[in-house]
Image (cartoon, helix red, strand yellow):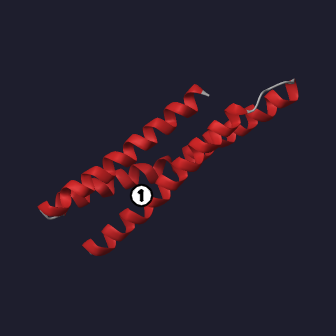
């Protein structure tokens, strides 16, 4: 039903938003730490590879959320479309910024 689809979308959108915030914070925290030795550099690289793996794991869920959001937008009454478009766009923007930050690191 439309209600279940809507609830599911908002649930995964919230989950992804929290994941993105935590990931960006972790990347920033790792960037602040000075790499003073070879071992420390290796630790930072390992941590970053772990972050990249988590991003890849969530990629399918992100794509699913974007698809579900577009589907809801098509079905939603006009009064609700603007909010759905806004939330879907915000999620896409946050995800893109997270990927950009991860690539820069």
Horizontal side of residue 7 vs 26, given as left or right? left
Q: How many marks?
A: 1
The quarter of the picture where residue 39 lies is top right
Looking at this view, name the residue that lies furthest to the left: 78
Looking at this view, name the residue that lies furthest to the front: 32
Q: Position of residue 35 (x, y in %)?
A: 79, 26
Whether residue 81 is situated above or below residue 89 in the rendered picture: below
Horizontal side of residue 50 vs 74, given as left or right? right
Location of the N terminus (image quadrant)? bottom left
Residue sitting at x 36%, y 70%:
7
Whether residue 76 is situated above or below residue 18 in the rendered picture: below
Q: Position of residue 9 (x, y in %)?
A: 36, 63
In this view, the residue in front, 89 or 69, is 89
Location of the C terminus (image quadrant)? top right
In this view, the residue in front, 60 or 103, is 103
Residue sitting at x 63%, y 38%:
27
How crowded is the residue under tag 1: few (<14 C-alpha within 10 Å), some, or many (20+)? many
Q: Position of residue 59 (x, y in %)?
A: 49, 46
Query: What residue did someone put label 1 on?
Result: 13
Judged from the image, the secondary structure of the residue bearing numbered disc 1 is helix
Residue sitting at x 77%, y 28%:
34
Horizontal side of residue 30 vs 2, given as left or right? right
Whether residue 8 is situated above or below residue 42 in the rendered picture: below
Horizontal side of residue 61 vs 73, given as left or right? right
């Amino acid at each position: 039903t439309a209600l279940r689809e809507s609830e599911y979308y908002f649930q995964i959108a919230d989950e992804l938003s929290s994941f993105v915030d935590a990931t960006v914070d972790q990347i920033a925290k790792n960037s602040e730490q000075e790499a003073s030795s070879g071992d420390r550099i290796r630790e930072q690289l390992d941590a970053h590879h772990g972050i990249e793996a988590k991003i890849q794991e969530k990629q399918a869920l992100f794509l699913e959320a974007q698809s579900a959001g577009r589907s809801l937008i098509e079905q939603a009454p006009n009064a609700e479309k603007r909010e759905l478009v806004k939330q879907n766009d915000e999620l896409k923007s946050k995800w893109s910024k997270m990927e950009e930050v991860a690539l820069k690191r």
